[in-house]
Image (tube, helix red, strand yellow):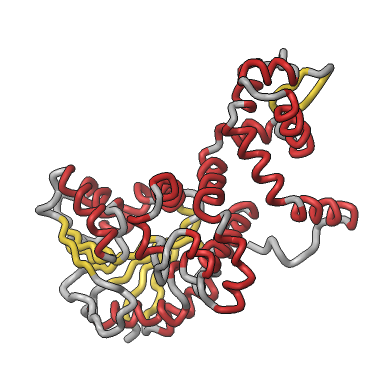
Amino acid sequence: MNFFSKDKKSAFDAKEAAQWIAFGPVIFQAARVLRNSGILKLIEESGRTGLTNEEIAEKLNLSNYGVRVLLESGLGLGLVLVNEKKYTLGKTGYFILHDGLTITNMDFVHDVNYKGLFYLDESIEKGKAVGLKEFGDWPTIYEGLSQLPAHVQKSWFSFDHYFSDDAFPLVLPMVYNDGVKKILDIGGNTGKWAIASTSFSADVHITIMDLPGQLNVARQKIAELGLSNRVDFLPVNILDETIKFPKGFDVIWMSQFLDCFSEAEIVSILKRCYEALDENGQVIILEPYWDRQKFEVAAFCLQQTSIYFTALANGNSQMYSSEVFFKCVQDAGFEITETTDHIGLSQTLIKCKKNK
Protein backbone atom coordinates (compact mmCIF):
# COMPACT_ATOMS: atom_id res chain seq x y z
CA MET A 1 0.00 0.00 0.00
CA ASN A 2 1.46 3.32 -1.06
CA PHE A 3 -1.49 5.63 -1.59
CA PHE A 4 0.08 8.73 -0.11
CA SER A 5 3.50 9.17 -1.68
CA LYS A 6 2.47 11.23 -4.72
CA ASP A 7 0.11 14.15 -5.26
CA LYS A 8 -2.29 12.85 -7.91
CA LYS A 9 -4.46 15.96 -8.19
CA SER A 10 -4.12 18.76 -10.69
CA ALA A 11 -4.05 22.28 -9.23
CA PHE A 12 -7.69 22.72 -10.29
CA ASP A 13 -8.74 19.44 -8.62
CA ALA A 14 -6.78 20.34 -5.49
CA LYS A 15 -8.53 23.70 -5.18
CA GLU A 16 -11.90 22.00 -5.64
CA ALA A 17 -11.01 19.46 -2.93
CA ALA A 18 -10.05 22.33 -0.64
CA GLN A 19 -13.57 23.78 -1.02
CA TRP A 20 -15.09 20.42 -0.05
CA ILE A 21 -12.97 20.52 3.09
CA ALA A 22 -13.87 24.16 3.81
CA PHE A 23 -17.58 23.33 3.60
CA GLY A 24 -17.16 19.92 5.29
CA PRO A 25 -19.51 20.50 8.25
CA VAL A 26 -22.17 22.02 5.96
CA ILE A 27 -21.91 19.13 3.51
CA PHE A 28 -22.18 16.57 6.27
CA GLN A 29 -25.25 18.07 7.91
CA ALA A 30 -27.05 18.69 4.62
CA ALA A 31 -26.53 15.06 3.56
CA ARG A 32 -27.63 13.81 6.96
CA VAL A 33 -30.84 15.87 6.95
CA LEU A 34 -31.63 14.86 3.35
CA ARG A 35 -31.40 11.26 4.55
CA ASN A 36 -33.17 11.60 7.90
CA SER A 37 -36.00 13.85 6.66
CA GLY A 38 -37.09 11.22 4.14
CA ILE A 39 -36.32 13.39 1.10
CA LEU A 40 -33.81 11.00 -0.46
CA LYS A 41 -36.04 7.99 0.21
CA LEU A 42 -39.06 9.70 -1.35
CA ILE A 43 -37.04 10.67 -4.43
CA GLU A 44 -35.77 7.10 -4.75
CA GLU A 45 -39.31 5.75 -4.62
CA SER A 46 -40.30 8.06 -7.48
CA GLY A 47 -37.85 6.22 -9.75
CA ARG A 48 -36.96 7.75 -13.11
CA THR A 49 -40.03 9.95 -13.07
CA GLY A 50 -38.71 12.06 -10.23
CA LEU A 51 -40.45 14.66 -8.11
CA THR A 52 -40.57 18.45 -8.06
CA ASN A 53 -39.53 20.53 -5.08
CA GLU A 54 -43.19 21.33 -4.40
CA GLU A 55 -44.30 17.69 -4.60
CA ILE A 56 -41.63 16.66 -2.10
CA ALA A 57 -42.55 19.48 0.28
CA GLU A 58 -46.23 18.59 0.16
CA LYS A 59 -45.69 14.84 0.68
CA LEU A 60 -43.36 15.36 3.65
CA ASN A 61 -45.18 18.37 5.13
CA LEU A 62 -42.07 20.54 4.85
CA SER A 63 -41.74 24.09 3.56
CA ASN A 64 -40.85 24.67 -0.09
CA TYR A 65 -37.94 26.78 1.11
CA GLY A 66 -36.51 24.09 3.39
CA VAL A 67 -36.74 21.41 0.72
CA ARG A 68 -35.27 23.75 -1.91
CA VAL A 69 -32.11 24.64 0.02
CA LEU A 70 -31.50 21.00 0.89
CA LEU A 71 -32.03 19.81 -2.68
CA GLU A 72 -29.76 22.50 -4.11
CA SER A 73 -27.05 21.46 -1.65
CA GLY A 74 -27.67 17.86 -2.68
CA LEU A 75 -27.13 18.76 -6.33
CA GLY A 76 -23.65 20.02 -5.56
CA LEU A 77 -22.92 16.88 -3.56
CA GLY A 78 -24.11 14.55 -6.30
CA LEU A 79 -26.84 13.12 -4.08
CA VAL A 80 -29.62 14.11 -6.48
CA LEU A 81 -30.01 15.09 -10.12
CA VAL A 82 -32.51 17.47 -11.66
CA ASN A 83 -34.07 17.52 -15.11
CA GLU A 84 -37.04 19.71 -16.05
CA LYS A 85 -37.53 20.53 -12.37
CA LYS A 86 -37.86 16.82 -11.47
CA TYR A 87 -35.38 15.45 -8.92
CA THR A 88 -34.06 11.90 -9.13
CA LEU A 89 -31.58 10.02 -6.96
CA GLY A 90 -27.86 10.09 -7.78
CA LYS A 91 -25.45 7.22 -7.15
CA THR A 92 -23.93 8.88 -4.09
CA GLY A 93 -27.44 9.48 -2.74
CA TYR A 94 -28.08 5.75 -3.07
CA PHE A 95 -25.08 4.94 -0.91
CA ILE A 96 -26.06 7.56 1.68
CA LEU A 97 -29.38 5.74 1.94
CA HIS A 98 -28.33 2.09 1.77
CA ASP A 99 -24.63 1.51 2.36
CA GLY A 100 -24.08 0.05 5.82
CA LEU A 101 -20.58 1.47 6.19
CA THR A 102 -21.72 4.98 5.23
CA ILE A 103 -24.73 4.88 7.55
CA THR A 104 -22.61 3.62 10.45
CA ASN A 105 -19.92 6.24 9.90
CA MET A 106 -22.39 9.12 9.55
CA ASP A 107 -24.27 8.20 12.72
CA PHE A 108 -21.01 7.77 14.64
CA VAL A 109 -19.67 11.12 13.48
CA HIS A 110 -22.89 12.98 14.26
CA ASP A 111 -24.03 11.34 17.50
CA VAL A 112 -20.65 10.66 19.11
CA ASN A 113 -18.12 13.06 17.59
CA TYR A 114 -19.67 16.22 16.24
CA LYS A 115 -19.84 18.50 19.27
CA GLY A 116 -16.64 17.15 20.81
CA LEU A 117 -14.65 17.91 17.67
CA PHE A 118 -15.05 21.61 18.42
CA TYR A 119 -12.35 21.01 21.03
CA LEU A 120 -9.84 19.27 18.77
CA ASP A 121 -7.33 22.13 18.85
CA GLU A 122 -7.49 22.26 22.66
CA SER A 123 -7.20 18.46 22.84
CA ILE A 124 -4.03 18.56 20.74
CA GLU A 125 -2.56 21.34 22.88
CA LYS A 126 -3.37 19.71 26.23
CA GLY A 127 -2.85 16.07 25.25
CA LYS A 128 -6.24 15.06 26.63
CA ALA A 129 -9.71 14.44 25.20
CA VAL A 130 -11.22 17.84 26.00
CA GLY A 131 -14.28 17.16 23.82
CA LEU A 132 -15.41 14.38 26.16
CA LYS A 133 -16.84 17.07 28.45
CA GLU A 134 -19.81 17.23 26.06
CA PHE A 135 -20.90 13.90 27.58
CA GLY A 136 -19.48 13.74 31.09
CA ASP A 137 -16.56 14.10 33.45
CA TRP A 138 -14.63 10.86 32.94
CA PRO A 139 -10.90 10.29 32.32
CA THR A 140 -11.77 8.50 29.05
CA ILE A 141 -14.97 7.67 27.20
CA TYR A 142 -14.71 4.01 28.20
CA GLU A 143 -15.55 4.66 31.86
CA GLY A 144 -18.68 6.46 30.68
CA LEU A 145 -19.91 4.22 27.88
CA SER A 146 -22.72 2.70 29.92
CA GLN A 147 -23.85 6.21 30.95
CA LEU A 148 -23.99 7.79 27.50
CA PRO A 149 -27.43 8.73 26.10
CA ALA A 150 -29.13 5.73 24.48
CA HIS A 151 -28.83 7.02 20.89
CA VAL A 152 -25.13 7.82 21.43
CA GLN A 153 -24.49 4.34 22.83
CA LYS A 154 -26.29 2.83 19.85
CA SER A 155 -24.13 4.72 17.34
CA TRP A 156 -20.92 4.02 19.29
CA PHE A 157 -21.49 0.28 19.52
CA SER A 158 -22.75 0.04 15.94
CA PHE A 159 -19.50 1.65 14.79
CA ASP A 160 -17.37 -0.53 17.05
CA HIS A 161 -19.06 -3.78 16.05
CA TYR A 162 -19.41 -3.03 12.35
CA PHE A 163 -15.70 -3.49 11.73
CA SER A 164 -15.32 -6.65 13.80
CA ASP A 165 -18.56 -8.54 13.16
CA ASP A 166 -17.68 -9.51 9.59
CA ALA A 167 -14.14 -10.47 10.64
CA PHE A 168 -14.98 -12.83 13.50
CA PRO A 169 -16.32 -15.72 11.36
CA LEU A 170 -13.13 -15.55 9.30
CA VAL A 171 -10.67 -15.51 12.20
CA LEU A 172 -12.32 -18.10 14.46
CA PRO A 173 -10.69 -21.03 12.58
CA MET A 174 -7.33 -19.22 12.67
CA VAL A 175 -7.50 -18.92 16.46
CA TYR A 176 -8.88 -22.35 17.33
CA ASN A 177 -7.01 -24.51 14.81
CA ASP A 178 -4.30 -25.46 17.33
CA GLY A 179 -6.45 -26.99 20.04
CA VAL A 180 -6.88 -23.73 21.94
CA LYS A 181 -9.29 -24.20 24.86
CA LYS A 182 -8.64 -21.42 27.37
CA ILE A 183 -8.66 -17.78 26.26
CA LEU A 184 -8.26 -14.55 28.16
CA ASP A 185 -10.25 -11.94 26.23
CA ILE A 186 -8.83 -8.57 27.27
CA GLY A 187 -11.17 -5.68 26.47
CA GLY A 188 -13.98 -8.08 25.63
CA ASN A 189 -16.52 -5.26 25.82
CA THR A 190 -20.07 -6.58 25.31
CA GLY A 191 -19.00 -10.21 24.89
CA LYS A 192 -19.20 -10.47 21.09
CA TRP A 193 -16.01 -12.53 20.78
CA ALA A 194 -16.90 -14.79 23.70
CA ILE A 195 -20.31 -15.52 22.21
CA ALA A 196 -18.84 -16.21 18.77
CA SER A 197 -16.14 -18.45 20.28
CA THR A 198 -18.48 -20.57 22.36
CA SER A 199 -20.70 -21.06 19.32
CA PHE A 200 -17.71 -22.08 17.20
CA SER A 201 -16.08 -24.52 19.65
CA ALA A 202 -17.76 -26.66 22.30
CA ASP A 203 -14.46 -26.96 24.20
CA VAL A 204 -13.44 -23.35 24.64
CA HIS A 205 -13.71 -21.46 27.93
CA ILE A 206 -13.39 -17.67 27.90
CA THR A 207 -12.49 -15.18 30.61
CA ILE A 208 -13.43 -11.61 29.71
CA MET A 209 -11.33 -8.92 31.38
CA ASP A 210 -12.62 -5.35 31.12
CA LEU A 211 -13.96 -2.38 33.04
CA PRO A 212 -16.83 -3.21 35.42
CA GLY A 213 -19.41 -1.19 33.50
CA GLN A 214 -18.73 -3.04 30.27
CA LEU A 215 -18.69 -6.42 31.97
CA ASN A 216 -22.19 -5.81 33.33
CA VAL A 217 -23.47 -5.58 29.76
CA ALA A 218 -21.52 -8.68 28.70
CA ARG A 219 -22.61 -10.67 31.76
CA GLN A 220 -26.28 -10.00 31.01
CA LYS A 221 -25.95 -11.05 27.37
CA ILE A 222 -23.99 -14.18 28.26
CA ALA A 223 -26.60 -15.17 30.87
CA GLU A 224 -29.46 -14.66 28.40
CA LEU A 225 -27.76 -17.08 26.02
CA GLY A 226 -27.20 -19.69 28.73
CA LEU A 227 -23.40 -19.48 28.46
CA SER A 228 -22.54 -18.45 32.02
CA ASN A 229 -20.87 -21.81 32.73
CA ARG A 230 -18.40 -21.21 29.87
CA VAL A 231 -17.57 -17.54 30.36
CA ASP A 232 -15.96 -15.92 33.39
CA PHE A 233 -15.61 -12.21 34.11
CA LEU A 234 -12.70 -10.32 35.59
CA PRO A 235 -13.38 -6.61 36.28
CA VAL A 236 -10.16 -4.56 36.22
CA ASN A 237 -8.76 -1.23 35.15
CA ILE A 238 -6.28 -2.37 32.51
CA LEU A 239 -4.23 0.80 32.92
CA ASP A 240 -3.45 0.03 36.55
CA GLU A 241 0.08 -1.29 36.09
CA THR A 242 0.08 -2.88 39.55
CA ILE A 243 -2.51 -5.40 38.36
CA LYS A 244 -0.93 -8.60 37.06
CA PHE A 245 -2.80 -10.58 34.43
CA PRO A 246 -4.00 -14.08 35.35
CA LYS A 247 -2.02 -17.10 34.17
CA GLY A 248 -3.00 -20.47 32.73
CA PHE A 249 -4.36 -19.43 29.34
CA ASP A 250 -3.46 -20.87 25.93
CA VAL A 251 -4.13 -17.54 24.23
CA ILE A 252 -4.54 -13.92 25.25
CA TRP A 253 -6.89 -12.35 22.71
CA MET A 254 -7.39 -8.65 21.97
CA SER A 255 -9.70 -7.37 19.24
CA GLN A 256 -9.90 -3.68 18.34
CA PHE A 257 -8.74 -2.96 21.86
CA LEU A 258 -5.15 -1.76 21.84
CA ASP A 259 -5.98 1.14 19.52
CA CYS A 260 -7.64 2.62 22.61
CA PHE A 261 -4.24 3.24 24.23
CA SER A 262 -1.05 5.23 23.76
CA GLU A 263 2.13 3.51 22.60
CA ALA A 264 3.53 3.42 26.15
CA GLU A 265 0.26 1.95 27.47
CA ILE A 266 0.24 -0.70 24.71
CA VAL A 267 3.75 -1.76 25.67
CA SER A 268 2.73 -1.91 29.35
CA ILE A 269 -0.30 -4.08 28.59
CA LEU A 270 1.69 -6.41 26.36
CA LYS A 271 4.49 -6.76 28.93
CA ARG A 272 1.93 -7.97 31.46
CA CYS A 273 0.63 -10.39 28.82
CA TYR A 274 4.22 -11.61 28.43
CA GLU A 275 4.48 -12.26 32.16
CA ALA A 276 1.17 -14.16 32.22
CA LEU A 277 1.94 -16.59 29.38
CA ASP A 278 4.05 -19.73 29.48
CA GLU A 279 6.55 -20.53 26.74
CA ASN A 280 3.88 -22.03 24.46
CA GLY A 281 1.28 -19.32 24.97
CA GLN A 282 0.28 -16.82 22.30
CA VAL A 283 -1.00 -13.30 22.10
CA ILE A 284 -3.37 -12.93 19.15
CA ILE A 285 -4.38 -9.42 18.12
CA LEU A 286 -7.02 -8.31 15.62
CA GLU A 287 -6.62 -4.67 14.57
CA PRO A 288 -7.02 -2.51 11.47
CA TYR A 289 -3.88 -0.63 10.35
CA TRP A 290 -4.27 2.23 7.92
CA ASP A 291 -1.06 1.39 6.07
CA ARG A 292 -2.11 -2.21 5.34
CA GLN A 293 -5.40 -1.50 3.57
CA LYS A 294 -6.28 -2.77 0.13
CA PHE A 295 -8.22 0.37 -0.81
CA GLU A 296 -7.40 4.03 -0.27
CA VAL A 297 -10.88 4.81 1.07
CA ALA A 298 -10.35 2.23 3.83
CA ALA A 299 -7.10 3.91 4.84
CA PHE A 300 -8.90 7.27 4.75
CA CYS A 301 -11.67 6.09 7.11
CA LEU A 302 -9.14 4.79 9.62
CA GLN A 303 -7.03 7.94 9.48
CA GLN A 304 -10.06 10.12 10.21
CA THR A 305 -11.20 7.83 13.03
CA SER A 306 -7.97 8.67 14.86
CA ILE A 307 -9.32 12.19 15.41
CA TYR A 308 -12.17 10.73 17.47
CA PHE A 309 -9.60 9.22 19.86
CA THR A 310 -7.80 12.56 20.11
CA ALA A 311 -10.80 14.79 20.82
CA LEU A 312 -13.21 12.44 22.62
CA ALA A 313 -11.97 8.99 23.58
CA ASN A 314 -8.75 9.49 25.50
CA GLY A 315 -6.50 12.09 23.85
CA ASN A 316 -3.54 9.79 23.25
CA SER A 317 -4.38 6.87 20.95
CA GLN A 318 -5.29 6.31 17.31
CA MET A 319 -5.86 3.84 14.51
CA TYR A 320 -2.19 2.98 14.20
CA SER A 321 0.05 2.24 11.27
CA SER A 322 1.51 -1.26 11.44
CA GLU A 323 4.99 0.26 11.65
CA VAL A 324 4.20 2.00 14.94
CA PHE A 325 2.08 -0.82 16.37
CA PHE A 326 4.45 -3.69 15.52
CA LYS A 327 7.29 -1.82 17.25
CA CYS A 328 5.19 -1.76 20.43
CA VAL A 329 4.73 -5.53 20.17
CA GLN A 330 8.45 -6.05 19.74
CA ASP A 331 9.33 -3.63 22.56
CA ALA A 332 7.19 -5.75 24.90
CA GLY A 333 9.33 -8.81 24.15
CA PHE A 334 7.18 -10.56 21.54
CA GLU A 335 7.97 -11.90 18.10
CA ILE A 336 5.25 -11.68 15.46
CA THR A 337 5.07 -15.20 14.03
CA GLU A 338 2.13 -14.83 11.66
CA THR A 339 0.40 -11.91 9.93
CA THR A 340 -2.83 -12.13 7.93
CA ASP A 341 -4.09 -8.99 6.19
CA HIS A 342 -7.39 -8.00 4.54
CA ILE A 343 -9.74 -9.86 6.86
CA GLY A 344 -13.29 -8.60 6.52
CA LEU A 345 -13.51 -4.87 5.90
CA SER A 346 -10.11 -3.81 7.16
CA GLN A 347 -8.62 -6.11 9.79
CA THR A 348 -5.19 -7.69 10.24
CA LEU A 349 -4.60 -10.68 12.52
CA ILE A 350 -1.19 -11.11 14.13
CA LYS A 351 0.00 -14.03 16.25
CA CYS A 352 2.78 -13.34 18.73
CA LYS A 353 5.03 -15.54 20.84
CA LYS A 354 7.65 -14.73 23.41
CA ASN A 355 11.09 -13.95 22.08
CA LYS A 356 13.51 -16.64 23.14
* Residue shown at 48% from the left, 65% from the top: 133
- Look at 74% across and 39% down and name the residue there: 77
The quadrant where residue 284 appears:
bottom left
- Residues 146 and 12: in front is 146
Q: Where on the picture, by quarter, is residue 280? A: bottom left
Q: Is residue 253 above or below residue 331?
A: above
Nearest the eye: 256 or 62: 62
Q: Position of residue 38 (x, y in %)?
A: 59, 27
What residue appears at the point 65 percent right and 43 percent down from the top-left corner?
29
Label count reads: 0
Would you say 323 lies left or right of 201 here? right
Percent x, y of residue 273: 29, 77
Q: Is residue 287 visible?
A: yes
Left/right placement of residue 67 relative to residue 136 reads: right
Q: Picture coordinates of residue 272 (x, y %)?
A: 29, 81
The correct choice, above or below, for 56 with respect to 258 in the image is above
Is 113 rendered above or below residue 311?
Answer: above
Q: Quadrant of residue 84?
A: top right
The N terminus - image quarter: bottom right
Image quadrant for the C terminus? bottom left
290 shown above or below 59: below
Q: Residue furthest right?
A: 12
Q: Is residue 258 visible?
A: no
90 to the left or right of 203: right
Residue occupying the point 45% across, 59% down: 135
Pick the front one: 296 or 149: 149
Residue 91: x %, y % from top left: 68, 32
